Image: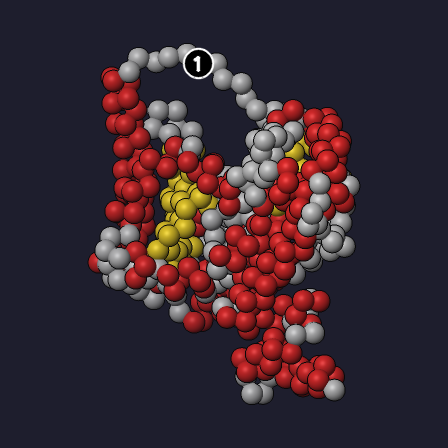
Amino acid sequence: MPSAWSSSRDAGSAASRLIIERAHEELVAGNVDDHRLQQVRPLVRESWERAWQLRVRAEGLPAVDLGSAELETYRRAHPLAEVMEMIRTLLLPGDPAESGVMVAVGDHVGRLLWVEGDLHQRVLTGEMGFIEGANWSEESVGTAAPGLAIALGQPVQIHESEHYNRLVRPWSCTAAPVFDPETRRLLGVIDVTGGAEAVTPQARMLVDATARAVESELFVSRLKARSVAPPTRRSQRRPAVTRAMLRVLGRDRAQLEATGPESESVVEISARHAEILLMLAVHRQGLSADRLAELVYGEDASPDTLRPEMVRLRKVLERLSPDLAPESRPYRLTVPLETDAQNVLSLLSRGAHRVALSAYRGPALPDSTSPGVEEFRDEVRSALREAMLTEASIDVLLAYAEIPEGAGDVEVLRLCLEMLPARSPRRVGLVSRIEKLES
């Protein structure tokens, strides 16, 4: 662990943690006048009350607002992208993979754009949804340092049991907001998450000093840019659609969501159009007419069968926005199209198994017999199963065993048995299920 995080202290006695946990239970139960709440730090108690009033779930997972492609595009253009190397140098000296802490940088509404640091910690924090693209605002997860620092506009430290969400209670965190050095508009937040070392006085000073250093660097960078080149006026057409999402999991008539600067549309599309759009989303580099026809209709299919359907699909998409209409030669989409299925794969690759399982609503276009769809459907199911068998915690694996993909999988059930404690009451039900499947 680097020297920056080598100093730690006890984050609080077991007795005080128990008092805080009981106070939280009373608040969640609706007993807002319970006397134990007065023993909680005012900053934390007031955040709890806001979360309770907003009906934030005490054990829920954060929403993943940014898929992989959208995340990459968004953070490339974010003002904090140019200072990420400075943040790494200041907060993750030495080998980041062995730092013992996680460093996250989020935007002005609490969406995490970068999450880096200790490899072991990344796997563990992924289970509670502390991943790139996830929304860690106070409105999404309740009391946590990133969202609270944004809400209050000041550095914040949150100890284990002070978190509103029970899934986050193994962790402690320190966060500081970052402001535009000229307008003082909120740009984002810098957070350090880990054990007791993440909430020391030294940690607070280091995170706050990093935020202020970032603001100074942004200001100096702008001054240099102005001295090199005079300002120019450029008119650039804003795209009518900036984000498109195709939802195909557990449904045959897919749902297409198109979001623009001033509008948002949601339409249900036909099964055939869903198959075509899914293939174009999966093969973002584009497909020839021959290859797309083969993926949608099967081997030896003629492009002449595909072309009339593409004309009809274009008309449907153009009613939403001209930007959505696919190009030809090759067939490709000009607006990045995210799919809920690809987001599951992205979450699995980031170690967020619990979030991925929650996002998995069933097979992609389950009744489709298009070869390309069948292959992609199997890819998603196989990736989910492999992650559950090799990397998931017992709680996540048990949840997987309750959905159709895992319920009839003897290997999954046997692994659950191996991972459960010897006296767990859940073992009896698992043994019964295995016997029925094998009989």
Above or below, comparing residue 343 to residue 196 in the picture:
above
The quadrant the C terminus occupies is bottom right
Residue at 70% x, 74% y: name it: 408
Q: Nearer the viewer, residue 375 or 181?
A: 375
Question: Is residue 184 visible in this depiction of the protein?
Answer: yes
Residue at 45% x, 64% y: name it: 124
Q: Nearer the viewer, residue 91 or 372?
A: 372
Left or right: residue 76 compared with residue 299: left
Residue at 69% x, 72% y: name it: 407
Above or below, comparing residue 248 to residue 25 in the picture:
above
Count residues near mark 1 (Cα–Cα under 10 Å), then give few for <14, some for 14-19, many for 20+: few
The quadrant the N terminus occupies is bottom left
Label 1 SS: loop
Residue at 39% x, 24% y: name it: 183
**What is the x, y in percent for residue 328?**
61, 30
Image colouring: secondary structure
Q: Nearer the viewer, residue 33 or 428?
A: 428
Count of marks placed on residues: 1
**What is the x, y in percent for residue 129?**
52, 56
**What is the x, y in percent for residue 245?**
63, 40
Give the residue type that dot 1 points to.
Arg
Q: Quadrant of residue 158?
A: bottom left
Question: Is residue 49 visible in this depiction of the protein?
Answer: no
Left or right: residue 245 compared with residue 252: left
Kindly identify which residue carries mark 1: 234
**What is the x, y in percent for residue 123?**
44, 62
Q: Nearer the viewer, residue 345 or 42?
A: 345
